[in-house]
Image (cartoon, rainbow, N blue to C red):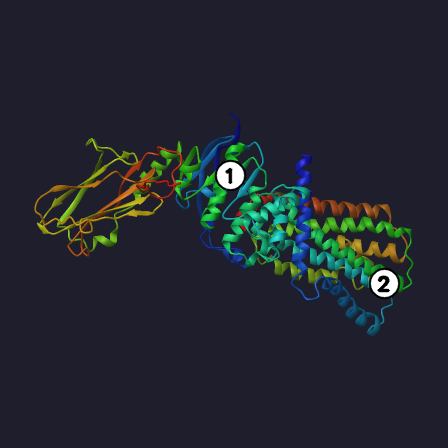
Amino acid sequence: MKKSNDKNLRILTELVKSEFKLRYQNSFLGYFWTLIKPLLLFGVIYLVFSVFMQSPIPNYPVYLLLGIILWTFFSEATLIGMNSILAKRDLITKIYFPRSIIIFASTISSLITLLLNLVIFFVFMLISHVPIQAEALFFIVYIIELYMVTTGVTFFLSALYLHFRDFQHIWEILLQIGFWLTPIIYTVSIVPVQYHRYIFLNPLARIIEYSRDIFINHHIPDLGLNLVLLLMAVVIFGGGYWFFKAKSSQIAEKI
Amino acid sequence: MQKALTLSNISKSFVLPHEKRDTLKENFLGLMRKRTYEQFKALESVNLSIQKGDFVGIIGKNGSGKSTVLKIMAGIYQPDSGKIEVDGTIAPFLELGIGFQPELTARENIQVNATLLGLSKKQIQEKFNDIVKFADVEKFLDLKMKNFSSGMQARLAFAIAKEADADIYLCDEVFAVGDEAFQQKCIEVFEDWKKMGKTLILVSHNPSFITQFCNKAFLLEKGKIVANGDPETVIDEYHRRIHLESKPQEIHKDFIVSDINISEVRFFDHHGIETNNFKTGETITARIFYKVKKPVKTPVFGIAIHRDDGVHISGPNTKTSEYPIHEVKRDGYLDCIINQNSLLGGRYVFTVSCFDETCTRPYDYHDKQYTFSIERNRENQYGLIELPVTWRHYG
């Protein structure tokens, strides 16, 4: 058992490495692009909402950048991740190893990008004179939960994608809608209270809002709220993994 | 003897939809029409058990389920029913590869694939040079895999699989690509594995590889095992089944002027005893019986001998042998005497024909319809035939 875990861990490491190379080797600016993309989006939205429309939210740039970085991770990781099984078809049809490793390798590669983006975010906080306090450590919990939600969704999507090849387009549209329904360019406080419970059905909304609470208000949300979010993350991750496992025995035949 | 791998009652079928529905729209529109499926039974209650140290050959025509069996053994496909028991680690080499990623360099692919086969970082470092040397790709290590020829890819894949240090090796058509030097290397590796007591499962279209290496063979037909045991016997059965199915060549039928019909061919040894089994160096008499409808002037009788893997060994006829037959008027037979045959051990197929004087119009033609075999009487036999050589040493 231990031996096979070691082996799977080594496979995961190798696949993450090769995934990283594959994603960035063909573009001129290479890895730089992934860092620039959320910044460009941030720049445009900042111009429109903060300069043109004079957003009333204090520390709006920090709000916005954090929301964009977390959302970009979710959308890129799920889009690339749902494709990863097909992209690795050469391996899958020739050799057996747990298929879930492919999904983990893909989302971990995206996670590394997220961490590098967060470095930019912290630099940005320093420039904006928002102090980083001890509560910021709690952000690690949200990153873990974000990773669980993202990977759970990716498991689900990649299993569906094998059966319906145009699911990718549908998911792209859903992500577009999600971008506006999630408090990314706005905060929940400007939304009428009666809609809050719908907005908070979305775990991404919770993760983004709670993270902002930590960094900007220096306040850790109540235990109850944190438990609800944790439960959501566990259910999505567990459900996605279970669904993927149930479908994974057929993967080699379906691709 | 310890068991290495057992398949009990394995069945596997693939669902082939008559219309392919991959997109949601197709699925949606398809709701209104009834979908028709075709169940393709790739394997039906396959039982086989392989002992440690066995070299097992799996033979069968295209689509008989050979590759599916290997993929089930490798864990790539899940069977619909049945049980697999494996004792030991498996290294697969399927369909000419172990799965390279075309956009990565050879160096990176070695790293990934060796890890997939269970090697640790340290082991990969130690074996890296051996792999590169065996595959003969020193100069191309930083070239992307997509630029490799299929032969190079297969060589590299085999080189990595070889280093996997597995207990059971699965090989699907290793010899299909690659030049003779590579085949020779593979053969040496097989010999090493045999000495080390490894288990090999070899799928090949080429029966002579199976008789050469394996101590056990299975014949698959339409997803079922129809023969198993000693490779020679299994391969005889394979040929028997192929000949049962193969129809006489239609193309010749149209041209045939059946003034002479070949009725049968029988083989006799030098004692005049009818047999189909000979030894190298023995004299073989092939007796060709014919029936005459109308007298024919100067017919040309010919034979052809092919090895069972299709290699054409020889094709003499009465014209090239300068043995003219002036006229045939009534039924009779003709002996073709192969003096002290120089054929090596193996199975041979025999073709017989009768043409007109110019060798353009056939009277009759029996393509590869007869077989005989030469006993494998010595360990070391190289090449196609045994030439009558004499050695002389001056020293």
Q: In this view, does B16 lie to the left or right of B131?
A: left
Identify which residue, B130 or B177, lies in the foreground: B130
What residue sits 41% from the left and 46% below the top? B62
Q: Residue B238: where, in percent of width, then height? A: 35, 39
Q: How crowded is mark 2: few (under 14 residues within 10 Å), some or many (20 or more)?
A: some
What residue sits 49% from the left and 42% below the top? B171
Q: How crowded is mark 1: few (under 14 residues within 10 Å), some or many (20 or more)?
A: few
Distance in Å between CA atoms under marks 1 and 2: 56 Å
Q: Which amino acid does label 2 sit on?
A: Phe
Which part of the image, by quadrant, shows the N terminus of chain A?
A: top right
Q: Which amino acid does label 1 sit on?
A: Asp
Q: Residue B80 carries which label?
A: 1
Q: In this view, does B86 lie to the left or right of A136?
A: left
Q: Is residue B39 left or right of residue B136?
A: left
Identify which residue, A101 or B157, lies in the foreground: B157
What residue sits 32% from the left and 34% below the top? B375
Q: What element does badge 1 sit on?
A: loop
Q: Which mark is residue A97?
A: none
Q: Residue A137: where, in percent of width, then height? A: 86, 50
